[in-house]
Amino acid sequence: MLTPQMLQYAEKFDDRGDIRWLPYLMYFHPADHTSDVVNTDRIGFRLSEHQGRRISAGGEVPDGPVRLVAGSSTVFGIGATSDAHTLASRLSAKHAPSTPWLNFGGRSFNSTQELMLFSLYRHLVPRIDEIVLFTGFNSLGLARMPRHLQGDHGAFFNGHEYADQVRAARLAKFRENGMSRRAASKAVGEPETKHIPPTLDEQIDRATDLTIRNVDNWRLLAAGLGAKLTFVLQPLAPWVRERPAPEESRLFAELDAIADFGRAYGDICTVDAGRRYARALSAGCERIGVPFLDMNPVLTEASDPGQWLFVDRIHFTDEGHDIVAGLLADRLGLN
Amino acid sequence: MLTPQMLQYAEKFDDRGDIRWLPYLMYFHPADHTSDVVNTDRIGFRLSEHQGRRISAGGEVPDGPVRLVAGSSTVFGIGATSDAHTLASRLSAKHAPSTPWLNFGGRSFNSTQELMLFSLYRHLVPRIDEIVLFTGFNSLGLARMPRHLQGDHGAFFNGHEYADQVRAARLAKFRENGMSRRAASKAVGEPETKHIPPTLDEQIDRATDLTIRNVDNWRLLAAGLGAKLTFVLQPLAPWVRERPAPEESRLFAELDAIADFGRAYGDICTVDAGRRYARALSAGCERIGVPFLDMNPVLTEASDPGQWLFVDRIHFTDEGHDIVAGLLADRLGLN
């Protein structure tokens, strides 16, 4: 087994398992989770390590200034063999150790959820000097989902389950108010099923619009807090190199036998698509004055063609985390 | 019937009716609703009127700068006999007409939902010069609710229904994953029932902490946008005067026969409780540098003892809306 640590993520950090539904955020990680691989605080933030201390927004918050790496599951650190191997920990321990880094990753989050997580919990962190928003893939992937799941702020993972529950709640309310079963069903309507997937351009436009809209709120909040903000487009294996490393080939084949990533995400998965998305995000960030970095070509350049970086197309090995943390420090001038 | 307009709010703008559940916000008004009394845009914002135009964030947005009055159902304008009698419309039409006012009220919203509504939709309004956050009652009322409904960001209305649906969703997922009915029920756990109501001091502390936490995000967003922000504690009938006007006495008695407000909200409903809450909010606003106004004593002073201001303890008559809009303009120096 190439990635035994993944079993530790499966039960509680996988959409097929127990989802911790929450108001506003929709869902977040289990709180107070402990294992050799992954540990969360009383809120659900993953712990990062800084000079032997285990820190997080809902746990031990260091005195003095801190920095945040925010995003979705890659920032959370799915794939890391322990909390020490996440981006926040590698930055804290080695590549940019002058000020501690907190993990503000939310697994399966879109850009709206990432913003909410920050808005709702930033008061726990008295002084924030720097925010690295390391994200971008989920919003593009979700932009493929059917129109009726997009709403005004983009689709989110598990959106089908949410829609089913809303239907059930409305049905129950109508019945409680004395409507017949037939009338209540009619009032609630049939779940929509028809879906014409958007073109790649439409998908990129939709994802970019939504992302930049949210990044603009990050910008205002960060500026008011005196924190530097950078948007980094996270690496996706097929945006980094056309040919995966040997271990990656084996893993991707195994994973595709369970759920075909290529079929699910279609034409996103080419280097060209990645660069087009990066150009759109870069233009959006420039318009609102937020520094932007596409980590994909940076990682291509910095790694050997056969180097094992990914445990699946979007999550890193320990070595991948370490290399990317080093590149972040280098390119963003973090110390 | 003293307030026939209330029938027009009952079916679609009442928690006993059809709730429009939504991601992130939890719920919002029906979209594209039309009637003689209340009209909403494609998102659910209520229209306000400015120089004969009907404006809203999701509908016609005026060119040039606008101002927002944000809050919950009182800002939405439950009680007004038409859109023209809401605070936003009275400010636009008469008391502060120099720049149009948009209605950013969300019925049954707490302070977190008010902040989210702004974060999620402010991009529709290119230039915002001023924000009046006219709110405060719901957060205090909700602070009475049981601990398990408070979560990390305070309780919200319809929270019981939400909790029931989450239980149902988790049960279904466990069953789908092959768990027996008994094991799944056990895993989900019993709904909590025990509840010791907090003291008034605890309630005020809880509501103030949460509110100021959210107002601090409003502050950062407003500052970045160059918009002036003021927090106004909204009037509650028993905070304005101990003895209601004659029409109010009749209405409150009728309403209490359906749902006893005094019993539901307990010791909140005295002038003294209102002043204590105002002092706590005022101190919180001062700490973060946001101007604060308690509208309650202002309204006491400005109105005649027998003047009919309220359709229920928290929503205004047309005359109430007009007087309060005038007092806002006067006290905040709006023109």
Image: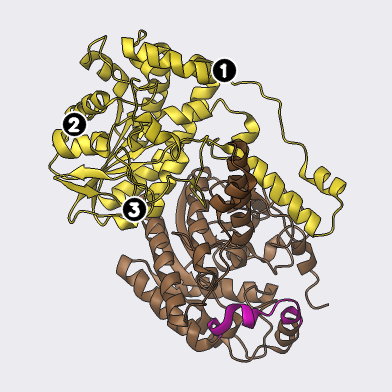
Chain colours: A brown, B yellow
* Residue B72 or residue B231, whichever sits in front: B72
- Which element type, helix, strand or loop, lies under badge 1? loop
- Whether A262 is among the magenta residues is yes
Residue at the disc numbered 1: B199
Give the quadrant of residue A145: bottom right
Position above or below: A161 against A326: above
- Nearer the observer: mark 1 or 2; the answer is 2
**Residue at horizontal 37%, vertical 44%?**
B218
Sequence-wise first label, 2 or 3? 3
| Relative to B203, B73 lies left or right | left
| Relative to B253, B57 lies left or right | left
In three-dimensional space, the C-alpha distance between marks 2 and 3, rounded to whole angstroms, equals: 23 Å
The residue stretch that appears in magenta: A254-269
Position above or below: B334 against B43: above
Sequence-wise first label, 1 or 2? 1
**Chain on which label 2 sits:** B
Same chain? Circles 2 and 3: yes
Quarter in which the N terminus of chain B is drawn: top left
| Label 1 Cα neighbours within 10 Å, binned few <14 / some 14-19 / many ≥20 | few
Our reading of the magenta stretch's main secondary structure is: helix
Position above or below: A6 against A219: below
Residue at the disc numbered 3: B122
Point out residue A169 in the picture as x, y percentages from the top left corner.
61, 46
Point out residue B79 in the picture as x, y percentages from the top left corner.
34, 29
Position above or below: B91 against A307: above
**Chain on which label 3 sits:** B
**Chain on which label 1 sits:** B
Residue at the disc numbered 2: B329
Can the viewer see residue A56 in this picture?
A: no
The kind of residue on which mark 3 rests is Arg
